[in-house]
Amino acid sequence: MITDANIGRNVTPAVFFEQHIRQHAVQYFPDLKAQEVNVRLVNRQQYRHSHFYRFDISGGGKSFHALVKTPPLHSPFKDRPKLGPRIEPSDKFDAQYKAMSKIHEYFTGLADPRFGTVRPLDKLTEHRAIIMEEVPAPSLRRLVEQTSRLKNPLRANGPDYLPLAFHNAGAWLRKFHSIPADQPVKIHNGLRSDFIATVSKLVDYLVNDDPRNLFLQKVAAKTVQDAIQILPEELPLGLRHGDYGTSNILAGLGGKVTVIDTPAICRSPIYEDLAYLLVAALKAKWSQVLSQNLVYDSRQFALYERKFLSGYFGQSPIPYRIIRLYQVQTILVRWSSKVFLLKEQSAGKNKFWKEFQLWQMKRFFKTMIRDLSS
């Protein structure tokens, strides 16, 4: 790891990162010439869970791009309901850097043209910052948003390679799940009883918020009954991504996919990552929830689902009944999390908007669960 004893401490993070990259640019990109290196901050982007600084590095007729990822100043809604194990920000930073390095090594070794990798360049422990080479490809989320009816009501189409990108995203996840561990890794939710306990806990949370919601109590009973009949006691496990959504899948021309943003700290049922993409990142996108399936073409989403699952399972039978069970669990996680987030927001002038979101969400998730349970 590289230290920065000669860089002043009383500077902004952006200036610090720029100075650090300038000092070590030739180590990151050997094609550069040290005496001609120029480093320029292109932009900054802030998200709920991270901040990104994008730098242009040039010299000797060569040009490269690097990203610096840092956590937010304040941990967002630490106590909200979630499915995966909780991890402290300092531990998450270190785990994400190690996972990025392992993924880069493993997928580079596969030499599969369907998959790209992000090359980690450095980590700065004091700033909890990861420096990585930028992959010049849009996210699947951005490509899916091109199909929104709000973008073009008459004909909203993404690139032709979008279905193939979903297929390759499924194939990538299958490979990722099978990455061998260098050391013993904890197992999370590895048993049927864990699934049942999680569903019961999520329903209890929602019923506590809405005691008159008899639908949820019926959901719990039906889901538990189906789990006992369908799920094996010991579930098939894979290295857990934990946030396998369209925002974290980059898709280049020809459907080549590169995946980012995982601490990969445990092994969990393979169905959790599968269901997360299908529900949280696709069919239950928030704009789709609020519009009651009007913003996107549900038939197109069904195509992406088929491509994604065929990419993951290949020639093997697809266990649709199990995947539907895990989609119900993911809906309950998303429902609980949204209720928590909306409750955390102050009402004020937005009370009507807040109540409208809750009402639309309940309608949407009830319909989804009925369809999945039928």
Image: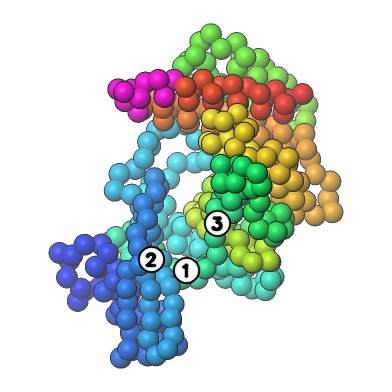
Residue 367 among magenta residues:
no
Please, what is the three-letter code of the amino acid marked with disc 3?
Ser
Segment colored magenta: 345-355
Residue under the point 44% across and 85% down: 62
Q: Counting other residues with Cα less than 10 Å from the Cα at mark 2, is it few (<14), some (14-19), or many (20 or more)? A: many
Q: Please tell me which of labels 2 and 1 falls first in the chain.
A: 2
Q: Position of residue 290 (x, y in %)?
A: 54, 30
Please tell me the numbered disc located at residue 134. 1
Q: Which residue is mark 3?
A: 139
Please tell me the numbered disc located at residue 116. none
Residue under the point 52% across and 58% down: 260
Disc number lying in front (3 or 1): 3
Asked whether, in this view, residue 34 is left or right of residue 166, the answer is left
Please, what is the three-letter code of the amino acid marked with disc 1?
Glu
Asked whether, in this view, residue 209 is left or right of residue 293, the answer is left
Q: Counting other residues with Cα less than 10 Å from the Cα at mark 3, is it few (<14), some (14-19), or many (20 or more)? A: many
Residue under the point 70% across and 31% down: 325
Relative to residue 47, is residue 55 depicted above or below? Answer: below
Magenta span: helix, strand or loop, mainly?
Answer: helix
Give the quarter of the figure containing the C terminus: top right
Of residues 67 and 123, the one nearer the viewer is 67
Residue with the most extreme left position: 10
Q: CA distance from mark 2 to mark 1?
A: 8 Å
The colour scheme is rainbow
Q: Please tell me which of labels 2 and 3 falls first in the chain.
A: 2
Mark 2 vs 1: CB contact within 8 A: yes
Q: Which residue is mark 2?
A: 54
Residue 315 visible here: yes
User: In terms of image quadrants, where is residue 2?
Assistant: bottom left
